[in-house]
Image (spheres, helix red, strand yellow):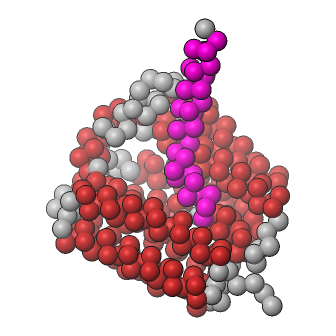
Amino acid sequence: MQSAALKIEKSKLADFWDLTKPGITFLVVITALAAFYIASYGSPNIVLLLHALLGIGFISGGGGALNHYIERQQDMVMNRTRNRPIPSGRIHPVEALIFGIGLSVTGIVYLFLAVNFVTALLGAMTWVGYIAVYTPLKKVSPHSTLIGAFPGAMPPVLGWTAVTGTISAEAILLFAIVFFWQMPHFLGIAWMYRKDYERGGFPMLPVAHPDGKSTFRMIVIYCTGLIPVSLFPTIMGITGYIYFLAALVCGIAFLYFAVRLALEPSNMHAKYLVLASVFHLPVVMTFLMIDAVRPV
């Protein structure tokens, strides 16, 4: 009996973990970490870093849980989401709501107490943008992906302000890299699951324009723009040329998969694009930290 109860408890914990959208939260933490490291000139305050990443992770996870709660009805009719914790019945909606609010408030308050006011304020604004603007907009506009890219690109800014307490040109540049990366990433997902999104009542760009031309055009435009934007850290003296080469190679590879999808539309090519995007961002952020220029 104890063993069975323990298995149920572990399963419940796994479902709550799933509510936090761990894949997205991982990318959030990685981009915040890179910005924190660069703002620290390669000598980060480890205690402050842990505080910052914990608070940012809580906000991201809380937002993910609330997104699950808000979209629970749509998730029930979409093939790729119907087995999520809420639509499957493993987690009650009220549990997810309390969990999401609790994590979000904890993260914002934690950043205020353990990091600084600016980071806590920006974290709260990011949360509002994701939950109160982007999430409801998904149900009414094909432009929701563009709007959602703004709060989605905020984690490196939070990482930067955690160290400096101010927003600088470097923070805006890191924001731009993640912003340009997000559009092809999420549009690729939207194309792969366009039938699902249509069933769920989400007028994503591939649903509103099923021929795919506008979707592929946006993907190629943003992948093309990502290349020069991602090279600016070297131009601005933030990194050396090892990063420059890595970012250039990753950017060209990402663009290759974008062009391939545009020329030969298929779910397989869309999957390759999404996989390329998942590879691109962590690699670029890692080389940002490896090749960050230290002050003389």
- Left or right of 22, for residue 36: right
On-image quarter of the N terminus: top right
Does the magenta run of residues contain 260? no
Q: Position of residue 260 (x, y in %)?
A: 25, 71
Task: Tell me which residue sits at (32%, 75%) in the image.
Answer: 256
- Left or right of 222, for residue 20: right
Does the magenta run of residues contain 9? yes
- Left or right of 276, for residue 23: right
Q: Residue furthest front?
A: 3
Q: Residue furthest top?
A: 1
Identify whether 45 is placed above or below 246: above
On-image quarter of the C terminus: bottom right
Q: What's drawn in magenta, residue-wise?
A: 2-31
Write down the quadrant of residue 259 in the picture.
bottom left
Q: Position of residue 233 (x, y in %)?
A: 59, 84
Task: Tell me which residue sits at (53%, 32%) in the image.
Answer: 15
Name the main secondary structure of what is drawn in magenta: helix
